[in-house]
Image (tube, grey):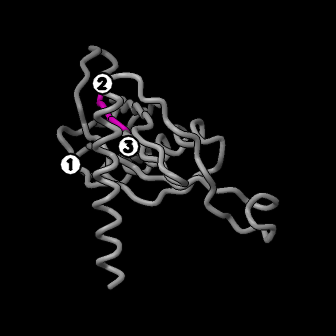
Amino acid sequence: MTELVLPTHANSLGSVFGGQVLAWIDLAAAICAQRHTGHLVTTAGVDELSFERPIKVGQVATFTARVTAAFRTSIEVLVRVDGEDATTGERWPCVSAFVTLVAVSVGGDGGGDGEPRPCAVPGLLVATDEDRALALAAGERRAQRLARRRQAAG
């Protein structure tokens, strides 16, 4: 996904708002997840973000999303964001995030009442060493997220 940073996307320093980048990350992750699952998805969580370098008005934000793990009804998507100066071709890392999304079905296969219900997602083919490392780390992140949720519930 590619976005041109316009003045409406920027703070008073001329850099894209972090919240705008997060909205674009969420959109890129949702598109990736829907392509993988064949279902509508809803965002369940986003891991912490640390911005490395800003993207300024007139520059381009590029988003690369890939599924890193598929669980029963949820998937994890890694979104990497790079800045680009379209005139020079210079590119730099801006931020990356792991987004967890849940596949949902509505209506007939969702319980009949029209309410969205989580549904099963297809497995993920892990073909390379990088794929395996990402999937293993995703399982560990998921276990940590579930433990935090149980702890918060008391």
Residue at the spot of label 3: 7
- Residue at the far top: name it: 88
Which is more foreground, mark 2 or mark 1? 2
Q: CA distance from mark 2 to mark 1?
A: 26 Å
Lateral position of residue 116 relative to residue 13, left or right:
right
Amino acid found under the numbered disc labelled 3: Pro
Q: Secondary structure at mark 2?
A: helix
Per the model, the C-alpha gap separating discs 3 and 1 is 22 Å
Circle 3: element type: helix
Q: Which residue is mark 1?
A: 50
Q: Amino acid at mark 2?
A: Asp
Q: Which residue is mark 2?
A: 129
Q: Is residue 41 magenta?
A: no
The total number of labels drawn is: 3
Residue 135 sits above or below residue 82 on the image? below
Above or below residue 133? Residue 27 is below
Residue at 42%, 42% (x, y): give it: 69
First in residue order: circle 2 vs circle 1: 1
Q: Along the horizontal axis of the image, is 149 left or right of 106?
A: left
Q: Position of residue 82 (x, y in %)?
A: 30, 31
State the quadrant of the C terminus. Answer: bottom left
Q: Residues within 10 Å of mark 1 (few under 14, many from 20)?
A: few
What secondary structure prevails in the magenta region? strand
- Which stretch did the figure color magenta? 79-83
The residue depicted at 24 percent of the width and 18 percent of the height is 90
Q: Are marks 2 and 1 in contact (CB under 8 Å)?
A: no
Comparing 61 with 96, the one in front is 96
